[in-house]
Image (cartoon, helix red, strand yellow):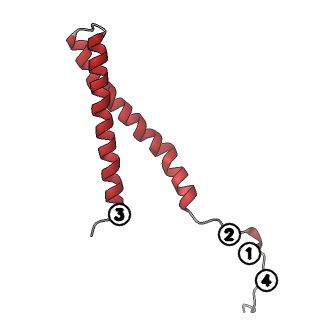
Amino acid sequence: MASPNYGRALIAGAFLAVLGVVIFILLWASLGGAGVANAPRLFISMCVPPAVIGLVFGLYALFGRKLLAVTVAPPAPEPEAFDEPLDEEID
């Protein structure tokens, strides 16, 4: 049975893949226009997109899940609820 998280993961993965391709194309075109030789141009264009994707994923892992957990988790019980006396005695 498919989990609803699979769809969200698929969308996030597709977004990161498109982001990587767009960054590659932008870097390749801008470095070519700047007159950079092909070897460094290819090296930079191939190494920067995975670093950016890793940075986005790392920031999500550090901050995104904590913020999501805070907004989704139920509120903690109030301290007064623990101080109420019991209705019946315990022997």
* Crowd rating for badge 4 (residues with CA inside 10 Å; few <14, some 14–19, many 20+): few
What residue type is disc 4 on?
Pro
Q: Quadrant of residue 74?
A: bottom right
Q: Are marks 4 and 1 in contact (CB under 8 Å)?
A: no
- Determine whether the residue tagged by mark 4 lies in a helix, strand or loop: loop
What residue does disc 4 label?
85
Q: Quadrant of the N terminus?
A: bottom left
What residue type is disc 2 on?
Pro
Q: Are marks 1 and 2 in contact (CB under 8 Å)?
A: yes
What residue does disc 2 label?
77
x, y percentage for residue 10? Answer: 30, 52
Identify which residue is drawn at 25% across, 19% down.
43
Q: Are marks 4 and 2 in contact (CB under 8 Å)?
A: no
Q: Are marks 4 and 3 in contact (CB under 8 Å)?
A: no
Q: CA distance from mark 3 to mark 1?
A: 35 Å
Q: CA distance from mark 4 to mark 1?
A: 9 Å
Identify which residue is drawn at 27% across, 18% down.
29
x, y percentage for residue 80? Answer: 77, 72
What residue does disc 1 label?
81
Identify which residue is drawn at 54% across, 61% down.
72
Q: Mark 2 or mark 4, which is nearer the start of the sequence?
A: 2
x, y percentage for residue 87? Answer: 75, 90
What residue type is disc 3 on?
Pro
